[in-house]
Image (cartoon, helix red, strand yellow):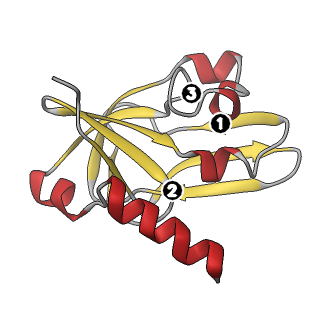
Amino acid sequence: MTPEVRYSPEHLWLRQDGERVTVGVTEQISRMLTWVKAVTLPAPGTRLAGGEELAAIESQKADISIAAPAALEVLAVNDLLAADPMIVRMEPRGRGWLLAASLESSAWRQLLDAAEYDELLQTQTQA
């Protein structure tokens, strides 16, 4: 069975795998980045409210602060990003994932499915 993927309006993808949710940036974010200098993530065990900073990405072109899409608890972070932060730009849906977290099922249901996310992208492109 393929894990379900949902999206936040702030261009995060979230892949549910049992009780754990893996979080990363979509191509919309990765395209805004050039040479990524650093990715700052919260420590495992950190609890974030929706809207609090989930990650900060420092690149040559833009510095981006990414908000948590909902309340969550960080279970693990992608240690590869400390040694090679460019992975977040080059492989945003693969090895460039940001962190794993626990997320309430009610929050999961509030996220966008693929069709809703595509519609959001179309709306933003036309604006």
Q: Amino acid at mark 3?
A: Gly
Q: Amino acid at mark 2?
A: His
| Extreme residue in the bottom direction | 127
The x and y percentages for residue 89 are: 69, 34
| Extreme residue in the right direction | 60
- Residue 11: numbered disc: 2
Disc 2, SS: loop
Counting residues from the start of the chain, the first of labels 2 and 1 encountered is 2
Counting residues from the start of the chain, the first of labels 3 and 1 encountered is 1
10 Å neighbourhood of mark 3: few (<14), some, or many (≥20)?
Answer: many
The x and y percentages for residue 118 are: 45, 61
Above or below, comparing residue 78 to residue 121 in the picture: above
Disc 3, SS: loop
Q: Is residue 27 left or right of residue 102?
A: right
Q: Is residue 125 left or right of residue 17?
A: right
Where residue 112 sits, quadrant-wise, is bottom left
Q: Residue at x 46, y 70 (%)?
A: 120
- Residue 78: numbered disc: none
Give the camera-side residue of 94 and 63: 94
- Assess whether mark 1 and mark 2 are in contact (beta carbons under 8 angstroms): no
Give the camera-side residue of 33 and 58: 33
10 Å neighbourhood of mark 2: few (<14), some, or many (≥20)?
Answer: many
Q: Amino acid at mark 1?
A: Val
| Real-space Cα separation, disc 2 to disc 1, in angstroms | 16 Å
What residue is disc 1 on?
39
- Residue 96: numbered disc: 3
